[in-house]
Image (spheres, rainbow, N blue to C red):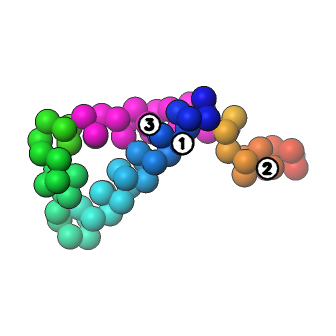
Amino acid sequence: MKGLHKISFILLIIGGLNWLIIGLLGTDYVMSILGGSIARIVYILVGLSAIVEIVNHKSLCKQCDKGMSQM
């Protein structure tokens, strides 16, 4: 599960930075570099990574764990 968390976290960083670049510059570098079909797969993986992180966040997040122990 730790490996899945690392992979999904890295994909979320890539997706987040891509959206930042799209917002600031209006250019989709993932699409430009990888092309349409592969970029679509990357976008699907980023979306699935977000779902994995949402489902597993409380059990994997050290900050949330600290917050829960203080309550």
Q: Residue at x 36, y 59 (%)?
A: 17
Q: Residue at x 56, y 31 (%)?
A: 55
Residue bearing mark 3: 49
Q: In the current view of this chain or complex, which residue is farthest to the right?
A: 70
Residue 43 at x, y percent in the picture:
28, 40
Residue 59 at x, y percent in the picture:
69, 35
Residue segment shown in magenta: 41-58
SS assignment for the magenta stretch, majority: helix
Q: Nearer the viewer, mark 2 or mark 3?
A: 3
Q: Residue at x 46, y 48 (%)?
A: 10
Q: Amino acid at mark 2?
A: Gly
Cβ atoms under marks 1 and 2 closer than 8 Å: no
Callout 3: SS: helix
Quadrant into which the N terminus falls: top right
30 shown above or below 23:
above
20 shown above or below 33:
below
Residue bearing mark 1: 6
* Label 1 Cα neighbours within 10 Å, binned few <14 / some 14-19 / many ≥20: few
Callout 2: SS: helix
Callout 1: SS: helix
Residue 24 at x, y percent in the picture:
26, 70
Residue bearing mark 2: 67
Q: Amino acid at mark 1?
A: Lys
* Distance CA(mark 1)–CA(mark 3): 10 Å
